[in-house]
Structures are given as structure tokens and as C-alpha cells.
Image (cartoon, rainbow, N blue to C red):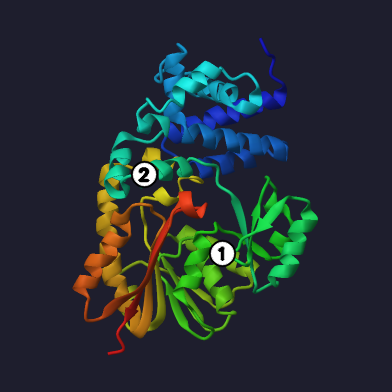
Amino acid sequence: MKVLMFNELWIQALVTETLSQVFIHNNRADRVLQRSLASHPALSEKDRGQIVDAVYDIIRYIRRLETAMEMSGEPSAADPDRWYDAWQLWRGLRPAAGEADSELVRRIESPDLPRAVRESVPDWLDARGVAERGVTWDALLAALNEKPQLVLRANTLKTPAGPFFDSVRDSGVPWHPLEDAPEAVVLEAFAPVFQWPAFKQGWFEIQDAASQMVAPFVEVRPGMRVVDACCGSGGKTLHLAALMRNRGRIIALDVDAEKLAELEKRARRAGATIIETRLITSTKIIKRLADSADRVLLDVPCSGTGVLRRNPDIKWRLRPEDLTRLLEEQQHLLSYYSRMVKPGGRLVYATCSVLPSEGEDQVRPFLQSFAERFSLVEEKRLDPHTFGFDGFYMAALQRTSL
């Protein structure tokens, strides 16, 4: 029997406790990990990386792992040691471990297994994906189970892209640029980027390549009045400020005060001085902004199916009734928030979902209902299996000048 070193016992305990918090107590994995790692400052960066990789991989493939446990005669999924068993099995199934049971690996990856088990998604979500994406769903699911790439965007309010690229090169971490995002780099290995001097100086933001496509799609210019209507913690808001060269005004709206506070903190570090945050407490906030914005970005609450790579626990929390509620909320927000666009202005509807019901199928009825006020200029869908990053849909809608 292998004797675990002390730091291995720490890793085991943190992994199993995090899995318990996610699956039993329905907590978000990223928040649980953040708290757990912060409470163990003695852990090395290597250990932290192992913990994060293990937690997300097990969440990503828990249904497949449970099937493997059943095949190998392990205790049932209801056993109190479920998370320890899943962690041990995950370690043994990794090719790098050199101890994988090749027959077991072959069986749990067999195409004869139901796709929902093989790709580890709830049955209802698998059925919904087939209904909405057809033959594309297989490739999409496989891509959504891949480990996400870490992408950094140069903050041009603080530095041109060139010096930022030089700072990444000096870090010694392998990286490559992105053709579709000229101010972005993709790191090819784990790096403690939050500890880099360049981060503390506000030289860059962590932002997936697909997310970086949204702000340019809004087509902002310096001096404009822009509303980011569901800004969250503000990744796209900061990108808009950089594209506007800190000239004009961005009104960042959200219903979550904590996210707005995080945006304000990020804006100070980034040197983005044109952002004004407003907490949505009533419909009066929207009414006061009617016909006032050159551009409105509406990145609506959604299923998050486009970001399952980085947040795989979403698929286990999401329920069919949640999607039904989200579809109703999206249509309401699109219809109601569109009144903030002034004549001749542009509304961009965006969602990090791979489901057309949250994208194209929301825009079509809106255009039918508001045919005299809005027209479709352009729409774009980014899929993980073709674009290589998160899944996004965006549509640019032009308001008539009258």
C-alpha cells in the first residue's frame, strides 16, 4: 500500500472536500476552490495546480467515473467515500500515472456507452443538445470537456501589446499569440499570473478569446455613451473602455452589488476611468436611460453551456426548469432593455451558450415584434469545436434613425 506524503494528504483532503461542497451542498466550484486554497497558503503552486486540475476533471467526468467505479466493483455512488474513490480512480486512469487499467479505460470510453455517460452530461441536457444542434452535438460535447486554455488580453490603457508580450516572454512560460485577437496571448502551461508584476500594474486581464470577440463586435468609438446592461464583474466592460481609449462614458448595470464592487476594483487597477457602475434596484434605472445610448451591450444571463470547459459544475446544477426561466428572462431583457438605444444606435445581444434557443431563436421573435425599430446587421456564433475556445453567440441590431 502506497504511503501518502503530508502534502499529498492535503491535496486528497482538499479535493474530496471541494467535491462534497459542489455536489452535496450545491456550491460553485470556483468559489469553493478559491476559499480552500486561500486557507492553505503553504501549498506550492504545483500542488495548487494539481488540486484545481483534479477537481475540475472529476466534476467534468463524474458520470463516466461513476460508471467506471461500478464496472470495477467499487462502492456505489451513494457511499460516503464516493469522492475519495472518484479521486483515486481519476489518478489511476490518467495516462501520465502509468498505472491505468487499459481494459477499464477502453470500456468507459467505448462508443457503445450512451453519449450522455461517455461525455458525462445529464440525460436531459444531452437530449436538448441533440434537438438544437443535431449532428454537431457530438463534436461540441467533446470540445466542451477539454481543459480550457488560459488567455490574457493586453490592457492598452496601460501598455501597448508589444511590451506586454515581452513581459510574458520574460516570465519563461511558453505562449503563442492569437490571430483573431491581436492583443491576446495563450499560455501553454500553468502560471501564477496574479502574482506577476504586470498584473498588479494593470497590464492585462484574464479573458477567454471568445469573450474578447464581443467588445469589438459592439463597434464602439471614443466619445460614445455606452451601456453595458448586464456587466457582471466587468471583463467586457474593461475591454470596451480600452477600445474607447478612456474617452466617453460607460454605464455598467447589474443586479449584483458584489459583482459591481469587483468591477470597480478591476477598473481602478486597469486605469479605466470612464466606467460608472449602477445597481439595478428598480425599472426606473432603465426608464431614465431610454433613448440615450449610442451602444448597448446586453450579455444576458444564460445556461452557461458555452463555458462548460472552465465551469463544468454548471451542467450538474442546471435543471430543465432553469432553462425555461432563463429563456423567458432573456426575451424580457431584450425587449425591455432595447429602449435604452437611441435612434441610429446599436444593440448587441450576446450569450455564452451553445444552444440556439438562447441565441438566434431569441433574436428572431424580437425582430418580428420590433421590425419598425430594429434590423439585424450581423450575427456570429463561436463554437468550441471549431473556434477552439468558449462558446458564444452575438447579434448586432441597428435601431432606425427615426
Q: Quadrant of residue 183?
A: bottom right
Q: Position of residue 362 (x, y in %)?
A: 27, 62
At a point 53% along the width and 29% down the height, the residue shown is 17
At a point 45% along the width and 23% down the height, the residue shown is 108
Q: Quadrant of residue 50?
A: top right
Q: Nearer the viewer, residue 217 or 130?
A: 130
Query: Mark 2 highlights which residue?
Result: 137
At a point 51% along the width and 46% down the height, the residue shown is 310
Q: Position of residue 220 (x, y in %)?
A: 49, 79
Q: Amino acid at mark 2?
A: Trp
Q: Amino acid at mark 1?
A: Asp
* Above or below 271: residue 400: below
Number of callouts: 2
Q: Nearer the viewer, residue 68 or 377?
A: 377
Q: Quadrant of residue 135?
A: top left
Q: Secondary structure at mark 1?
A: loop
Q: Position of residue 45 (x, y in %)?
A: 71, 40
- Of the two numbered discs 2 and 1 on the same chain, state the one appearing first in sequence: 2
**Structural distance between the alpha carbons of marks 2 and 1:** 24 Å
Q: Do we see residue 62 in this rendering?
A: yes
Task: Give the quarter of the figure containing the C terminus.
Answer: bottom left
How packed mark 1 is, by other alpha carbons closer than 10 Å (few <14, some 14-19, many 20 or more), is: few
Mark linked to residue 331: none
Task: Give the quarter of the figure containing the N terminus.
Answer: top right
Furthest residue in direction bottom, as rendered:
402
Q: Is residue 372 left or right of residue 94?
A: left
Query: Mark 1 highlights which residue?
Result: 180
Q: Secondary structure at mark 2?
A: helix
How packed mark 2 is, by other alpha carbons closer than 10 Å (few <14, some 14-19, many 20 or more), is: some
At a point 39% along the width and 19% down the height, the residue shown is 78
Q: Do we see residue 234 in this rendering?
A: no
Q: Position of residue 121 (x, y in %)?
A: 38, 36
